[in-house]
Image (cartoon, grey):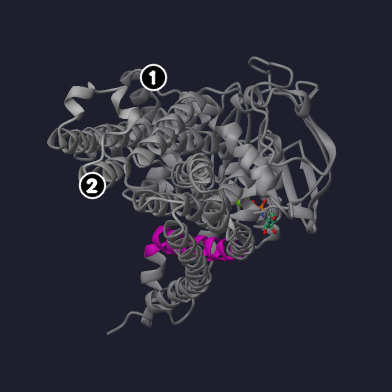
Amino acid sequence: MPKAANPDPFPSTLWRLWDQCRPYRLHLAGSVALAFLSTPFALLVPLPLKLVVDNVLTHQPAPAWLERYLPSAWLRSNTNLLASAISFLLLLGLVMQLQVLASWMLQTYTGEKLVHDFRARLFWHVQRLRLSFYDRSGTADVAYRIQHDAPAIQTAIVQGILPFVTAVFSFAGVAWVTCKMDLPLALIALSVSPALVYLSRSASLKVHDGWHRVKELDSSAMSVLTEVLSAVRLVKAFGRESDEDERFATRSSQRVDGQMRLALTQAVYYCLTALLITFGTAAALWVGTRHVQAGLLSVGDLLVVMAYMTQLYEPLRTMSNKIPEVQASLVSLERAFALLDEVPETLSSAGRPIHRVSGRIEFQNVAFAYHNQRRVLDHISFEIEPGTKVGVLGPTGSGKSTLLSLLTRFYEPAEGSILLDGIDIRELRLRDLRDQFGIVPQDPVLFNCSIAENIAFSTPDVSQETIVAAAVAAHADQFIQLLPEGYETQVGDRGCCLSGGERQRIAIARAFLKNAPILILDEPTSAVDSKTEAAVISALDALLRGRTSFMIAHRLSTLERCDLLLHFDSGEIKVISDDVKMYLRRLARAQGFHFEEPPPARLRPDIFIAAPSDSSTAFAD
Ligand SMILES: Nc1ncnc2c1ncn2[C@@H]1O[C@H](COP(=O)(O)OP(=O)(O)O)[C@@H](O)[C@H]1O
Ligand SMILES: [Mg+2]
């Protein structure tokens, strides 16, 4: 997974964040407006106190500005003045709580919608990334970025940017009022700001890098977790539990170290900020007291100014603390945006549309290597007429599956071209191209839902009859009927409740249902016994009729019914187009097997392998 290449990703991340938030700009503006209200409210809080100290306790007449709002006859009574101050305080408290409530709800709604949209966009994107991307970066890190990094959009906005913007405005408001009341005092209080800005900047640079490391460690701990959980049988079978515990604990404890270093940086920074602010307050108190003694300021004014001082420092503290705090969210966002930088396949927008092809296929001097490693395929050229049954055989690792992955454009050839009905497949619309293939993969994966839903994977809204018909054709109906809940049986995680052969037959039923003009069968009977194999093969006969098909198989019996063979042999590919049976017979003989017919099941080379001489005693008491 690429890291952010930009050395200072700050501005670009903020810009992309804004772009992602654009649909909710009105909600965000509403949140900011509500938050702004808190500034005038906060400025009003000390006023009742000033009124009580300056006017009620000292029996001074009510200030002139108050007479604008209340009748002067009412204000002449000292008790009334006190009642006014108290009522004002209570009313202000109520309004402030209403503002908090509205602000909370709006922020939660906006934040949750932002996370939902961002995750949906990431999920849409990663589903369209090339397979080569997943070969490179694995799936656990991608899952981590969508599930754990993407929600940072909410934290960045709600706990970072909104409070920061609000703090800027309330700081400006309080600074203006304080300057008006006592300029030298305000300037003394503000003199600590440059030091705060400097501290905040250097702390954020430090924690930014630290967060990158912590996130990577976190994601790699999660990859151990997903790996082990998805292979829990294997771990148990090999007794690897404690090794895996250790692997997980190592990565997890490295994360603890990283977090501790971050906490130390942040704690030191907070202490320094707090000390600077205390220093500013102390200086202001010194000067303020002198001003009162010199008669420049009333005691009430000094109290108000000192209260404002707290309110002046509060946004200043928020502003300087938010910058390092928001780094964790910004790092997460950088990681999530890096996913969006990966170029996806263009499935449906670009390319020539096609409907059902006839199935003529031509490979012209095709070469391919996985991530610039050694070439798996080289100089591959052959031509296949529509409706041909092509058998593919060769040793494992020789590139059979790879060849067929090129056909469906799961990977792109490094050289040469592949033509479908005379058109280069790179020119075709990818969605349409993939619609032409029915695939029965080597190790069929089922989703954790019912058997019926798994069969209808390509076309979810087909009728139950069609699903059953496909299962009958794939010789799967028999075993499905025996299950307690039949077609509604849940197959478990990745189909774990079914045997390999049962999964394979469900995959064949899927291919029947898709009814595509070209079929790719990657060892479709590798996991079934010879009786079921005969049944599946006869099912396949029906499926293959009239379609171009590729069948990878190790059992020579399975290949017998093919019209043409692609034989991968010592780095090259032989195309056998005439008398396939004769070729297979010679091959069997060369490998030391007797080719007898019928029945075809006897052709399986594996049944000729002699058991080790002492195998009969292996399980003896
Ligand atoms: N996703 C992949 N990334 C890197 N190498 C791969 C990948 N898939 C297969 N290979 C390598 O390519 C070669 C051909 O693999 P494959 O086509 O699966 O063989 P076959 O299907 O004939 O058994 C093997 O050497 C294998 O290790
Ligand atoms: Mg293979």
Residue 58 has which mark? 2
Q: Amino acid at mark 1?
A: Asp
- SS of the residue under disc 2: loop
- SS of the residue under disc 1: loop
Quadrant including the N terminus? bottom right
Dot 2 surroundings within 10 Å: few (below 14), some, or many (20 or more)? Answer: few
Q: Main secondary structure of the magenta part?
A: helix
Asked whether mark 2 lies closer than 8 Å to ligand 1, one says no
Residue 403 lies, with reference to residue 61, above or below; the image says below
Name the residue nearer the viewer: 356 or 557. Answer: 356
Residue 260 belongs to magenta span: no
Q: Amino acid at mark 2?
A: Thr
Quadrant position of residue 228: bottom left
The boundaries of the magenta stretch are: 209-232
> Looking at the image, which residue is at 67% across and 42% down?
341
Residue 612 has which mark? none
> Looking at the image, which residue is at 41% across and 66% down?
234
Residue 217 belongs to magenta span: yes
- Where is residue 467 shown, x and y percent of the image? 36, 24
Name the residue nearer the viewer: 89 or 470. Answer: 89
Residue 408 lies, with reference to residue 553, above or below; the image says above
